[in-house]
Amino acid sequence: MKFVRTMMIREFKDTEDINQAVKLATLCFHEPTKEMEKFFAGIQELKMIGAFEENTLLAAAGAYKFQMFIRDTLFDCAGIAGVMTNPTERRKGYVKELMNKLIVDKKNQDYPVAALWPFNHSFYQKFGFGNAEKIISYHFKPSDIKSDFKLENDIKICDVTDEKDYLPLIQVAKNALNKYTRIIGDVDAWLLRGELQGYFKIYLIERDEKPVAYISLKFKKAKEWENNMQIMDFAYIDIQAKHSLFAFLRNFEADINQISLTLPVQEEIESYLDGVKDTHKFSQWPAMFRILDVKKAFEQLDYHSALNEKLYFQVEDNVLSENSGIWNLEINNGNCIASKIEGQNIAKEKILEFSINQLSQILIGYSKVEHILEHTGIRIPEEWKHKDLFPIMPCSFMLWF
């Protein structure tokens, strides 16, 4: 008689499920058990589902809620994390089922987009995720920052150490000129709860007792003190505050040898350094994003007020069939109405064809459609070539681990 295995997918329900996830993560991610325990304990908002056989965990995946700026607009985002399969159970389609279920569930929970930071980018392309534009990791000395940037006379710099101080951070983030930074607030306060216990510092910059900028810094420590630091996040509401922020960084010259920073826009950092050395490189772990709800995603963006365009595109989504079809975007007075077209006679040359991966890349920060389709041979309608078609501000790429 042939033995038939019974596998079921369900949500995690108790501590035993989490304990199994810790063991599986230790095996899959090659990390110490204590680190995996800290990971699952620290992300309280992480909702996990698993493939179980008689309550034995074979594979798992999870998602949590955070917020991020996409092209100058604040979006709720489903962050995919903890995707793993026991090596003895791989190539059996468990992760495929888990990922498809997560995508459908998060769409039904009204998330317009999802994001992840994967080991294997090509694997997640199968589920409709598209790569963001490459971001650059910079490594520079405090003395490389131009000396003509000075702290304003009426500036006050405060060390943020308590949850009650989140509010001014949120105020800065929501009014910031640089919308690619992560917003710090109750939606991802787990980051602060975990990291503030170690060598993680947040500084709030105030002008006339009003918050105008913040910066979060992570200091490394192994067996001995390492005088390097990483900028995890920074935001500012005006250029003067940005000048003060970089002037503050320059003050670390006495005790810090190297500052690390990862950004999607070169000009953001290069204009503040005396010289850019060959020490910066493209990040090896770029983010991937996916549209979960085409209508909601495009209607939520803020568009140029003078823009008046009608765009047509056809998209194929193998996981969320409601996204598939021919769509019309009517952009007017800074707003967009997205609607599916059924039974209308639209000239084929006006319809641009996308995969859901490519459409996601359009949303998340590629400045031009041509950058995505330049090697495909697809003819691009003139309406899609408008240089101000979408807001030019890139989205958040900051990593939290």
Image (cartoon, rainbow, N blue to C red):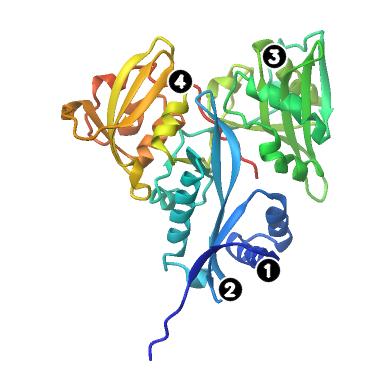
Find disc 3 in the rendering and name its residue. 243
Instruction: Tell which tag, 3 or 1, sits nearer the viewer.
Output: 1
Instruction: Tell which tag, 2 or 4, sits nearer the viewer.
Output: 2
Find disc 4 in the rendering and name its residue. 391
Which quadrant holds residue 378? Answer: top left
Residue in the image at 72% along x and 39% along y:
189
Residue in the image at 81% along x and 10% along y:
208
Categorize mark 1 by other alpha carbons within 10 Å: few (<14), some (14-19), many (20+).
few
Name the secondary structure under disc 4.
Answer: loop
Q: Type of residue at label 1?
A: Glu
Residue 122 is situated, as x and y percent measured from the top left of the image, at 41, 50
Q: Type of residue at label 2?
A: Asn
Q: Type of residue at label 3?
A: His
Look at the picture and state if 208 lies above or below 314.
Answer: above
Q: Type of residue at label 4?
A: Pro
Look at the picture and state if 36 lies above or below 52.
Answer: above
